[in-house]
Image: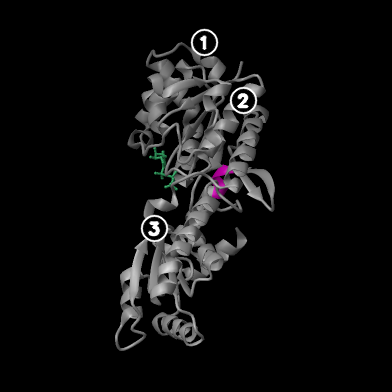
Amino acid sequence: KKKIAIMTSGGDSPGMNGVVRACVRMALHMGCDAYCIYEGYEGLVQGGNLIRKMEWYDVRGWLSEGGTLIGTARCMAFYEREGRLKAAKNMILNGIDALIICGGDGSLTGADKFRAEWPSLLEELVANGTFTAQEVHPFSHLNIVGLVGSIDNDLSGTDATIGCYSALARICHAVDLIEATAYSHSRAFVVEVMGRHCGWLALMAGVATGADFIFIPEKPSEDNWREEMCSIVEHHRKIGKRKTIVIIAEGALDREGNKITPTMVKDLLADKDGLGLDTRITTLGHVQRGGTAVAYDRMLGTLQGVEAVKAVLEATPDTKTCVITINENKIMRKPLMEAVLDTKKVAKAIERQDFEEAMALRDTE
Ligand code: ATP
């Protein structure tokens, strides 16, 4: 009987529980044993009761729960070979040779490294007397499939990551609430949303709430962003708008690569010699990540979880490690490291202030 383990890693995102539920149930449906690794890579490194066999009813009701019920953690030990050696040992002790990992690009990079190193990890476990060659023989091929759980929608190669639409819905709801006060008092609000290298949340929240102005990392405003923003806000005020909403991604930059902060924007809008608006800052923070998954993320997590199990069962030793994506409404499998490397290219382009390159890469995603 094949034993398939599922884990969540990196930052939590709404929809991860749907993934776990789908993987567990699809694995059981296909006649396999299903396991959950609790606390991300930490569970794999520590083993013991952090690796648990799951039954059909263990994941009952998980679809509508927020966060990840099997936990997630940043695991320093997994960056080191010694940690990965312990992880390999725990996999073999539990008879597991297939892993489905739902996380961000860091988690998927770790997964790829683990698979690449697997043969040498087995050799070492035999050489140091942990197992015999016969004991490790059935585990000669490690099978890994990735799923992207992230609220930022920051992975290249997929139209949506699991959790991004829930976060977007939460932001829109928060802006709706803020707007009531903004309108009543004729105020301006600067709303900071998540997104260090990826402005998708800020951009789409801007579109979905009809914000006056947005700031994103990939396309910093021109040198004259101050004048540009103020003249747009002024125009909106002149035509009778009583509320001003400016959305700013936490990684927003100017053309020189300097951070644009909510305070800078607030001071500008409030400047007595300029617009003189009564301006407040709202940092949404972890509210964006919390709560139940919206219908789209439940659906995406479920469909992709099912596909991940299929990918595990169809893989051969020569199959490249894949990540499950959604492209033009079709659930697809793509080479995992290509998606991760393309993602890192955008972050690097932003870091070296090559914004044209960052935008070009986003366009081809
Ligand atoms: P998020 O997008 O929410 O930050 P992430 O998956 O990118 O999610 P990371 O903190 O980068 O989050 O990675 C999660 C865990 O994956 C790390 O704590 C570590 O255990 C493992 N990991 C990440 N990168 C590597 C790597 N290069 N080698 C080995 N393990 C890694």
**Residue 215 quadrant:** bottom left
Task: Identify the magenta region.
Answer: 335-339
User: Distance of mark 2 from mark 3, alpha carbons?
Assistant: 38 Å
Disc 1 marks a residue whose amino acid type is Gln
Q: Closer to the N terminus: mark 2 or mark 1?
A: 2
The quadrant of the picture showing ligand 1 is top left
Q: Are marks 1 and 3 in contact (CB under 8 Å)?
A: no
Number of numbered discs on residues: 3
- Magenta segment, prevailing SS (helix, strand or loop): helix
User: To which residue does mark 1 refer?
Assistant: 134
| Left or right of 99 in this view: 31 | right
Which of the two marks, 2 or 1, is nearer to us in this view?
Answer: 2
Between 153 and 277, the one lying in front of the other is 277
| Left or right of 278 in this view: 138 | right
**Residue at 55% from the left image edge and 38% from the top image edge:** 146
Quadrant containing the C terminus in the rendered view: bottom right
Disc 3 marks a residue whose amino acid type is Leu
Give the percent coordinates (x, y) of residue 112: 50, 38
Q: Closer to the N terminus: mark 1 or mark 3?
A: 1
Is residue 125 shown in magenta? no
Does dot 2 land on a helix, a strand or a loop? Answer: helix
**Residue at 38% from the left image edge and 27% from the top image edge:** 45
Q: Are marks 2 and 1 in contact (CB under 8 Å)?
A: no
Does dot 1 land on a helix, a strand or a loop? Answer: helix
Disc 2 marks a residue whose amino acid type is Ala
